[in-house]
Image: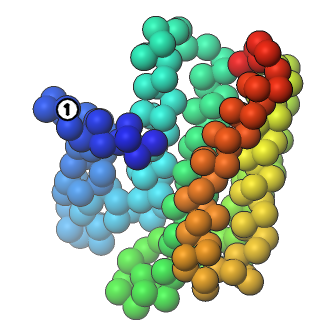
Amino acid sequence: MNLSFFALQSVPSPSPSVSPLSRGSAPLFPARLGFRRLKEVPFMKSLIVAFSWTIPATLLPICHAGLPMDAATGIIGVFFLLQTFTNTVVCDLRDVKGDAASGVRTIPTLLGSKRTLLLLIGLNISIGAALVLAGGFLSNSCAALVLVAGMVYTMAYLLCFQRFGTEKLLFELFTDGEFIVLAVALYLLTLAVQHPPI
């Protein structure tokens, strides 16, 4: 994903993932509202970051392969959106004291750490279950297994946040390493199944 993002930044034409508007840094609102930039709107910063990672990660592979968008593309897109949104909010959870002191309105500063964790757990259980069912019915069992692995991994580090959240290096390895673990799992799956219908 980092390589994809770097490639997008290297393109001379404006890209929706790296433009000032999509990053939320362009002033859009009058000062009397209390916020001027899109990323200053509560909840919006996490969504901007999530969409900025989801769009290239979902669309670049099918564009490169020349494949049409289908239901599986939508399932993978929602999966990436949920995971990157969760990771972004988790980073805000770790910086909640600094954000509160500087007046930055993030989800944890508005809801509190415990409610934010409950929100993320609820989102991952509800949306994750829907994605797994959709992946099993519309795509195949192999895709559903990868989705299950991603949801279980995310739930694990959310439930362990209270214990390991202060260990910066260890917890960042868990959160940022999620897609590496899923890539390895998918590779092993392709070795185990000669022609996986993914």
Residue 121, percent from left and from top: 76, 61
- Relative height, residue 136 to residue 77 (above, below): above
Quadrant in the rendering for residue 42: bottom left
Residue at 43% x, 74% y: name it.
105
Q: Which residue corresponds to the image point at 37% horizontal and 83% vertical from the top-left?
A: 103
- In the picture, residue 6 is in which quadrant? top left
Residue at figure coordinates x 79%, y 45% from the top left: 149
The part of the image, by quadrant, that contains residue 71 is top right
Q: Dot 1, how many residues are within 10 Å of its Cα: few (below 14), some (14-19), or many (20+)? A: few
Image quarter where the N terminus lies is top left
**The C terminus: image quadrant:** top right
Q: Amino acid at mark 1?
A: Val
Q: Position of residue 124 (x, y in %)?
A: 74, 52
Residue 146 location (% of width, % of height):
76, 36
Which residue of the protein is positioned furthest toward the front in this rendering?
191
- Residue 45 shows in this picture: yes
Residue located at (42% from left, 33% from top):
56
Q: Is residue 19 above or below residue 13?
A: below
Residue 136 appears anywhere in the view: no
Viewer-closest of 165 and 14: 165
Could you say which is closer to the camera, residue 24 or residue 182? Answer: 182
Give the residue pinned by disc 1: 11
Q: How many marks?
A: 1
Horizontal side of 188 relative to 77 (left or right) equals: right
Tell me where residue 145 appears, x and y as whole percent: 82, 35
Q: Report helix, strand or loop for mark 1.
A: loop
- The correct choice, above or below, for 47 with respect to 148 in the image is below
Q: 34 or 174, which lies in front? A: 174
